[in-house]
Amino acid sequence: MVCSGSQGQKRRISAAQYFTACAGLLVFFALIVSSNPAAAQQQNYPERENLGPMINSEYDEVLPVIAPDAKTLFFVRKGHPDNTGSDKKDDIWFSRLQPDGRWGRAENIGTPLNTAGFNFVCTVMPDNNTMLLGNQYFEDGSQDEGVSLTTRSEEGWSMPKNLRIERLQNLSIWSEYTMSPDGRVLIMSLLRPDSLGGRDLYVSFRQEDDSWTEPENLGPSVNSKGSDITPFLAADGVTLYFSSDRPGGYGNNDVYMTRRLDYSWKKWSRPQNLGYPINTPGWDAYYTVPANGEYAYFVSTSSGEGKSDIFRITLPEDARPIPVMMVSGKVTDPDGKVVPATISYERLSDGKQIGTATADPESGEYKIALPVGYDYGFHAESDGFYPVSEHIDLTELGEFEEVQRDLILAPLLHGTSIRLNNIFFDFDMDVLREESKPELDRLVRLLKKYPSMMIQIDGHTDDYGGYDYNMKLSRRRARAVVNYLISQGISEIRLIPRGFGKTRPVATNETDEGRQLNRRVEYTILQN
């Protein structure tokens, strides 16, 4: 889940700069506040907040994972009498955020996710409809080491599907996993022959056949001679939080932060201790952050009762992940009927698919998290419909935002006209820009899937300029699209270019937004 630029005159310093400047002060003040909690308030430190009896019980609560939209918290209760199985081991529980901002009473998530064994959530994907779970699940109720995926269905959570990781070897009985927001990378805590000390953090990549590569050690830039555990990769796909007992901490285990520096997943910034009051003389781990980066949720034994509770704390700006935009909406047909769909999103500069999400099969709702710094296209796909696209430019976004974008899928019927949203030309030009190729390649795949389909490519303009000028420009742009389709193996006889200039507006030409809607390329199905 990329670096962000700031917006306007805002200046955002990096986490590395912040912690370099403040490391000495953090150590000094931590010594003060550990013996005098009131000093935290005097120094304007945020206060850690125990989530209270709706979530924390007389039993141990561990492994919290907050959904990216910050509205559902999943966690594990150990040995609770309402757990599954005769020995009441570790079950998944969840709580929903209430309208008043408080957490509701926790509920056991039930079967098939909870079994007689150890059960826990590793990652909630941005769509809120897919989760990565610890362990592999089998039909007889048994489990084995590894991870699995479950998706939301109309009946509830599906039977988890096991992921195949090549040569997964772990010499410890403990392990934790986190998945990148695009679903293509796993980071895990394992003990292997090449570990530097105790457990280390490793990376694995999804392959074309949906198997996963052998785990690779992240190396000494992240790992230590101690135990490095409980990794959590934020919604930006760049910021990694983990817990470690390495020297120089405040207690048994402290939470650290590092940021990925390139696409190899092997180069990271120097891990920074997040300081007091996140870290205490107790055991602090299982750190999780929603997409907005406002709060961090974590586990600590600092309550004085000798058990693990879940806390949250308001994050300082420089301990937050890089901003993302949460895009949500519903997927329907033109009549408003929910369409089961997969949402895919790509970086338009190079056409690389960034990730996929699933829409809720009952409500049609979807969510995706897009890191700042790029221009994106995203679209919903479902059999019998054309994947109508949307476009969103995040090259200038400097802080977390949420937007609503409903996706209406057009049925592949005779006479249907479908707008190609992500087609780009420079002003007064008829040469397709590189960012147009992902959209056109989808049309190529459609035409190859339906070899008898014939379409008319329609070019349209706004009302800037004269009638003849706009007619010629719209024809040239329609022809440019046809030429690209031909270059990809589509027979010219199946393609009819037409230009309509400014004669068929779909919005007012009195505003910039309206004129932009009128400058468009569509295709009309002439024959299925």
Image: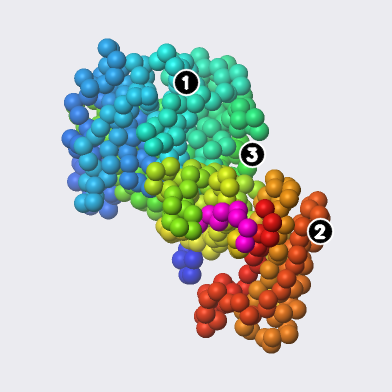
The one nearer the camera, 6 or 369, is 369
Q: Please tell me whether mark 2 sits on a helix, a strand or a loop.
A: helix
Mark 1: amino acid: Gln
Q: Secondary structure at mark 3?
A: loop
- Tell me how far mark 2 sits from mark 1, CA to CA: 51 Å
Q: Which residues are magenta?
A: 408-415
Is 286 on the left or on the right of 408, as rendered? left
The amino acid type found where label 3 is placed reads: Ser
| Residue 10 pos. (x, y %) | 46, 66
Tag count in the figure? 3
Q: Amino acid at mark 2?
A: Glu
Mark 1 or mark 2, which is nearer the start of the sequence? 1
**On the image, numbered disc 3 is attached to which residue?**
264
Q: Position of residue 411 (x, y in %)?
A: 56, 54
In the rendered structure, which disc, 3 or 1, sits on the residue that comes first in sequence? 1
At x 50% / y 61%, what residue is drawn? 397
Mark 2 Cα within 10 Å, few/some/many (few <14, many 20+)? few
